[in-house]
């Protein structure tokens, strides 16, 4: 017996379908938020790795200006000939003074306070060996040199971002599992509700696969409808939060921006959940019908 599209009304349940749609909307709304957080955190972590993993700052703390300038010259000469160094440049003194102005004020900067010289160093390879080589060059140039490896003091931040990302992706997995569970319960409830109709369809020649297909189509439509509602609501929240982050003008938070591929993955969420729901519904219905017969 071939099932026509009009036969889907035999298993209709308007109230149950409305409930299913809103449950899916809420779950996919939360999934979109979790996915957006996970993808943006992963992007921020990658941006930190690219920008800071191979960067050092060498400070020359010397009160005597002449000695400080001579030490900086020796330091730059040694760094620029080192194989592990890709770039070494002194931070502009005026720029450094502007960075210190909020803490020292105009009076403090005008008091001829000794300001340490700073040299930015980009490494060809980011590892302990390269850092140790730069440290030896710096100390050979002047005992007043202090080497700061950006990756070391940002390690806690990177670890926090990594943990946050795993939590977000874990939430996505939990939501997917919960969606499959809801579909299984919905399919079993539908079987119990329409047991008499299913028995009649069996007597008319319908197979278990054909009946399962009816449930698949119904649940797919409900999941996709709720998914679109939840995705639109989730994207609206993500856009609002993104605009607020952009207004903060923070270099660290700027890395939380989503790429085009990230947006495509988020938009594909309702389709992915629809496919998951169809597979879960098919398995549940076929297994239940097989146990009955």
Image (spheres, rainbow, N blue to C red):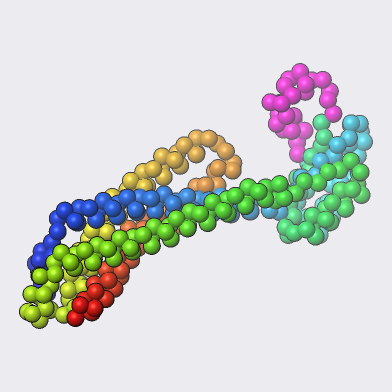
Which region of the structure is painted magenta? 91-114
Which of the 4 image quarters holds residue 17?
Answer: bottom left
Q: Residue furthest top?
A: 107
State which quadrant residue 104 falls in.
Answer: top right
> Would you say residue 206 sits in the magenta stretch?
no
Residue at 47 percent of width and 50 percent of height: 37
Up-down: is 285 above or below 229? below
For the question of whether residue 48 can be seen, the reply is no
For the point 91% across and 43% down, the residue is: 143
Residue displayed at 16% across by 80% down: 207
Is residue 160 among the parts visible in the rendering? yes
Our reading of the magenta stretch's main secondary structure is helix
Q: Toward the viewer: 136 or 191? A: 191
User: Toward the viewer: 189 or 42?
Assistant: 189
Q: Position of residue 106 (x, y in %)?
A: 73, 20
- Name the residue: 72% across, 58% down: 126
Image coordinates of residue 73 in percent, x first then y, are 87, 43
Indicate yes or no whether the magenta region holds residue 110: yes
Q: Report the label total.
A: 0
Quadrant including the N terminus:
bottom left
Residue 284 pos. (x, y %):
27, 71
x and y, in percent, of residue 209 in the image: 20, 78
**Quarter that holds the C terminus:** bottom left
Q: Is residue 215 left or right of residue 44?
A: left
| Residue 100 lies in quadrant | top right
Q: In this view, does 279 lie above or below 122?
A: below
Q: Relative to residue 237, is residue 97 drawn left or right?
A: right
Left or right of 26? Residue 259 is: right
């Amino acid at each position: 017996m071939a099932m026509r599209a009009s036969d889907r009304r035999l298993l209709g349940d308007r109230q149950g379908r409305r409930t299913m749609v809103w449950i899916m909307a809420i779950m996919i709304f939360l999934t979109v938020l979790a996915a957006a957080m996970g993808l943006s955190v992963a992007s921020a972590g990658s941006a930190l790795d690219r920008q800071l993993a191979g960067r050092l700052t060498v400070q020359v703390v010397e009160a005597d200006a002449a000695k400080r300038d001579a030490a900086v010259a020796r330091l730059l000469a040694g760094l620029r000939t080192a194989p592990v160094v890709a770039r070494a440049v002194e931070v502009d003194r005026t720029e450094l003074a502007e960075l210190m102005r909020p803490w020292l004020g105009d009076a403090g900067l005008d008091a001829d306070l000794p300001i340490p010289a700073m040299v930015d160093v980009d490494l060809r390879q980011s590892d302990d060996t390269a850092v140790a080589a730069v440290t030896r060059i710096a100390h050979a140039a002047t005992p007043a040199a202090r080497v700061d490896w950006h990756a070391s003091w940002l390690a806690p931040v990177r670890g926090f971002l990594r943990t946050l990302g795993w939590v977000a992706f874990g939430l996505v997995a939990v939501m997917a599992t919960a969606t499959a569970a809801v579909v299984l319960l919905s399919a079993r409830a539908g079987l119990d509700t329409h047991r008499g109709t299913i028995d009649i369809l069996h007597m008319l020649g319908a197979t278990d696969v054909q009946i399962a297909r009816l449930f698949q189509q119904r649940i797919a439509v409900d999941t996709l409808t709720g998914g679109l509602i939840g995705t639109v609501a989730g994207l609206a929240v993500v856009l609002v939060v993104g605009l607020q982050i952009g207004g903060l003008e923070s270099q660290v938070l700027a890395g939380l921006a989503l790429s085009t591929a990230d947006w495509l993955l988020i938009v594909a969420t309702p389709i992915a959940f629809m496919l998951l729901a169809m597979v879960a519904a098919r398995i549940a219905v076929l297994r239940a019908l097989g146990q009955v017969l």
